[in-house]
Image (tube, grey):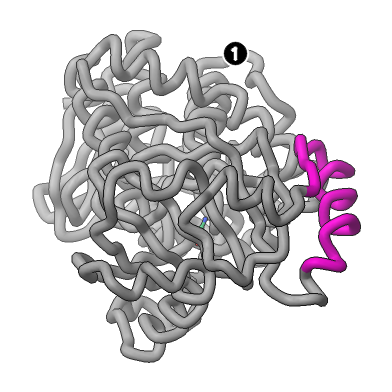
């Protein structure tokens, strides 16, 4: 059976593209080794926080800002279609200072956030504690970024997969996928079940995107896995309002009473063990942010793989092989970039004008494609 499009990778990015294509009437199948939305899409914290992530590359920042603007409609659409709410919370991010140096740096930090488009303000100690009363008594103040948000990415994954299924997208589990293409055009893919013809194939395989077999030399990309270890504590509901950030560690509340604490950043290939050192590093900072956290139960630890490109920008768009598209390398911002990536790639495939400028993200800039 031939189909219009095959998506390799059932993460949020792959499912988002599949959903957008199916809404346009395309027949779409998504292939993955694992259950849909169970790799980085499940492991992430769901932060929609490009300013706090210190994205400064203007092209990437514009892409992130466009996706942040698209999020409310994206989540609303999924809720209306499936009844599943991804719990988008627009409470902003608090960057907390606990020592003289970071307290003194607040004004410069705030200016830097504002230059990038953040709605940032400096808070004194009282205003900081009024926003997040759980903070440790030694807090000195904060910089507050109002225009950031968070979403429950696991719920979002469930909603998006349900929406895909409702729109007619098929999901196939497979041990492996190889692209089938001649020097000019894609013909489909091959799995252990045989050949599947398709006029369009999208590589949305996250940290594994560089490993897709059968890609001709001029269309290759390399993606590096960067592990992030995380943990969750069971805290009283409403314990924190929004994202809290200090010394590269962030706290992210969930409506179910978990508080996520993340994340380390370690390059050790595809190893997703959670190490004692990783947990210690996260808890050291978290308990400084709020010593009371030391009294709560540690209910979960996990790790995921961020897909990193060679220059920090995702690879988005067509390749030198007709019909073969790439949507990979979203690194720390894959959950944030899901709506804009889905809309832009689906538009490109459908011959429409993408809602954002994609030139800076051309997959053909990858050193492997030269
Ligand atoms: N976006 C959060 C992280 O990658 O740790």
Give x and y (percent) for residue 231: 32, 68
- Front residue of 347/99: it is 99
Q: Is residue 110 magenta?
A: yes
Q: Is residue 326 visible?
A: no
- Front residue of 279/208: it is 279
When asked about the image quadrant of residue 53, the answer is bottom right
- Front residue of 281/313: it is 281
Residue at (69%, 25%) from the top-left corner? 356
Residue at (39%, 15%) from the top-left corner? 76
Quadrant containing the N terminus in the rendered view = top left
Give x and y (percent) for residue 240: 44, 48
Q: Is residue 85 magenta?
A: no
Residue at (48%, 36%) from the top-left corner? 338
Identify residue for label 1: 352
Where 190 sits versus 63, above or below?
Answer: below
Task: Give the mark count.
Answer: 1
When asked about the image quadrant of residue 317, the answer is top right
Where 256 sits versus 96, above or below?
Answer: above
Q: Is residue 114 visible?
A: yes
Residue at (58%, 60%) from the top-left corner? 245
- Which stretch appears magenta? 103-122
- Front residue of 147/286: it is 286
Where 328 sits versus 166, above or below?
Answer: below
Give x and y (percent) for residue 335: 46, 43
Quadrant containing the C terminus in the rendered view = bottom right
Q: Mainly helix, strand or loop, the magenta region?
A: helix
């Amino acid at each position: 059976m031939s189909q219009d499009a095959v998506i390799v990778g059932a993460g949020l990015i792959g499912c988002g593209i599949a959903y957008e294509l199916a809404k346009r009437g395309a027949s779409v199948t998504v292939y993955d080794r694992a259950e849909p939305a169970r790799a980085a899409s499940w492991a992430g914290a769901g932060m929609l926080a490009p300013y706090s992530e210190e994205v400064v590359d203007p092209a990437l920042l514009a892409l992130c800002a466009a996706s942040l603007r698209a999020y409310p409609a994206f989540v609303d659409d999924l809720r209306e279609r499936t009844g599943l709410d991804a719990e988008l919370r627009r409470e902003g991010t608090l960057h907390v200072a606990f020592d003289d140096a970071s307290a003194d740096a607040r004004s410069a930090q705030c200016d830097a956030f504002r230059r990038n488009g953040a709605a940032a303000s400096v808070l004194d100690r009282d205003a900081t504690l009024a926003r997040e009363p759980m903070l440790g008594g030694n807090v000195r103040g904060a910089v507050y970024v109002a225009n950031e948000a968070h979403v429950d990415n696991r719920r979002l994954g469930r909603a998006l997969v349900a929406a895909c299924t409702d729109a007619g997208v098929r999901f196939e589990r497979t041990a492996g996928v190889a692209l089938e293409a001649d020097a000019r055009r894609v013909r489909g893919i091959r799995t252990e079940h045989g050949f599947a013809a398709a006029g369009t194939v999208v590589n949305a395989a996250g940290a594994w995107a560089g490993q897709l077999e059968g890609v001709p030399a001029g269309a290759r990309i390399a993606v590096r896995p960067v592990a992030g270890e995380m943990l969750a504590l069971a805290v009283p509901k409403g314990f924190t309002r929004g994202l809290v950030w200090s010394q590269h560690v962030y706290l992210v509340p969930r409506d179910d009473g978990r508080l996520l604490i993340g994340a380390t950043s370690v390059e050790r290939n595809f190893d997703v063990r959670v190490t004692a050192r990783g947990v210690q590093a996260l808890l050291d900072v978290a308990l400084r942010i709020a010593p009371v956290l030391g009294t709560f139960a540690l209910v979960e630890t996990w790790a995921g793989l961020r897909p990193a490109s060679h220059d920090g920008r995702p690879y988005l768009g067509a390749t030198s092989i007709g019909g073969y598209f790439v949507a990979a390398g979203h690194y720390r911002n894959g959950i944030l970039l899901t709506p804009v990536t889905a809309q832009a790639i689906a538009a490109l495939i459908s011959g429409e004008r993408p809602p954002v400028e994609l030139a800076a993200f051309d997959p053909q800039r990858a050193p492997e494609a030269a």
